[in-house]
Image (spheres, rainbow, N blue to C red):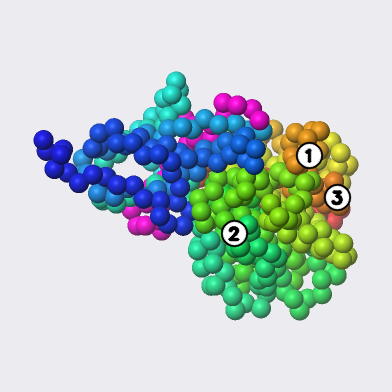
Amino acid sequence: MLALLLAAVTVSTAFEGGNLGKVETAAPDHLRLAVKGQADQNGRNRQANWYYFELRNLPKGAFRFDLTDLVGEYNFKPGSHAVTKGTRPVYSYDGGRTWTHFTDDQVSWNEDAKELTVRFVPAKPLIRIAHTPPYTNSNLQALLKEFAAKSYLKQESIGASVHGRSLPLLTITDFEAPESGKKVIWWMVRQHAWETGTSWALEGGLRKLLAPESAGLRKRFVFKVLPCPDPDGMAEGGVRFNVNGYDINRNWDAIDPATMPEIAAMRKAILAWVDSGHRIDLFLAMHNTESVDYIDTMLSTGGPELNTLAQRFQRLLNEKTVFYAPNGPRDAGESTTPGMKGRKTVHQELFAARKVPAFLMEQMVENHPRLHRPPTVQDRLDFGAALVDVLTEAVTPAQP
Ligand SMILES: [Zn+2]
């Protein structure tokens, strides 16, 4: 009888980046929450690993929710799921400003049903919960506004998304120092909207690059940064495809400005840079995945120079960061699905089109062997700052 008098817990996703599927009330203190997921333009490769929702009117006692409908496909292989036994949702009691992972003793995994259950005692009646710490367009705009007056940060728009949001390109350098003596690094994050860890890492990197103590670096380097390849996904809670279903890290060999204007605009900007006589010493696209860290480039076709760069990049990551890739760099091959059009990643395409020394980086969201915890926001910020040193040293070999 008492339970009937309690106000029902309600669920909201009506905010930037919010997303969840069907909500079922199993009991007043137990919700079953389907993860909506997203499929590609052909209804394939469904991925269900972005959820971001708010629970209101939480009871004072124990509460439980199950995340359901997690199974999809990856690269056309059915049965894959990216919410796993090892992923830990994050929560915020302050409207998304600070995030904490649920702990191992609060989380359990049902292998038969492929469901993740969280049991916790709410500290407040309102909580936000997400797969990884959210990073929205508002976070990026706040950061850029903070540095807008700096002469060494140029912001431009290179196009618009399907829903008309701007695609920003940032240039960070000392514009008074001649470009002829500088090395150039292109840095892309967040091709896949759920991979918020890459945005936090970039924020750490940008704060370092824009700090007064980096004046020397800015004289010697040009950083070209693509912080937001899928602004619709960041705003609307997308997973890994643009709003028309096109994977923003496939399709780099199938350009169509009508259905995937994001890829078309970014590819055009990158190739225009190369074709107008500028250099690219290293191109990096950052990603997140469940349980591995690695860098990946065209080892088998890239020749000794690219292989040497890959080894140096890996060694510096080992020395200066917590990056954990004991097996070294991976070989990217020519396509994620050889023989099928529309399956090349940004790094595969840039190497094929202009021999750009391009890398993909994956970083895990599960418990990290060197951190002994799932990476936090601070861990990502620290990594991004250290990555600036890694990237600049990787393209500046010591004199013999
Ligand atoms: Zn990705």
Q: Residue at x 54, y 54 (%)?
A: 234
Circle 2 crowding by C-alpha within 10 Å: few under 14, some 14–19, many from 20? few
Which range is magenta?
76-100
Q: Amino acid at mark 2?
A: His
* CA–CA distance in space, label 1 to label 3: 15 Å
Q: Residue furthest left?
A: 1
Q: Residue at x 71, y 43 (%)?
A: 250
> Which quadrant holds residue 47?
top right
Q: Amino acid at mark 3?
A: Ala
Q: Give the overall secondary structure of the magenta segment.
A: loop
Q: What residue is shown with label 1?
A: 341
Tag 3 secondary structure: helix
Q: Position of residue 199 (x, y in %)?
A: 57, 55
Any part of residue 392 in sight: no
Q: Position of residue 362 (x, y in %)?
A: 64, 42
Q: Amino acid at mark 1?
A: Lys
> Compared with residue 351, is residue 68 higher up or lower down, i.e. above or below?
above
Q: Position of residue 63 (x, y in %)?
A: 27, 38
Circle 3 crowding by C-alpha within 10 Å: few under 14, some 14–19, many from 20? few
Q: What residue is shown with label 3?
A: 353
Q: What residue is shown with label 2?
A: 163
> Compared with residue 323, is residue 230 higher up or lower down, i.e. above or below?
below
Tag 1 secondary structure: loop
- Look at discs 3 and 2 and give the one toward the viewer: 2
Q: Earlier in the sequence, mark 1 or mark 3?
A: 1
Q: Position of residue 134 (x, y in %)?
A: 48, 52
The answer to whether marks 1 and 3 mark residues whose Cβ atoms lie closer than 8 Å is: no
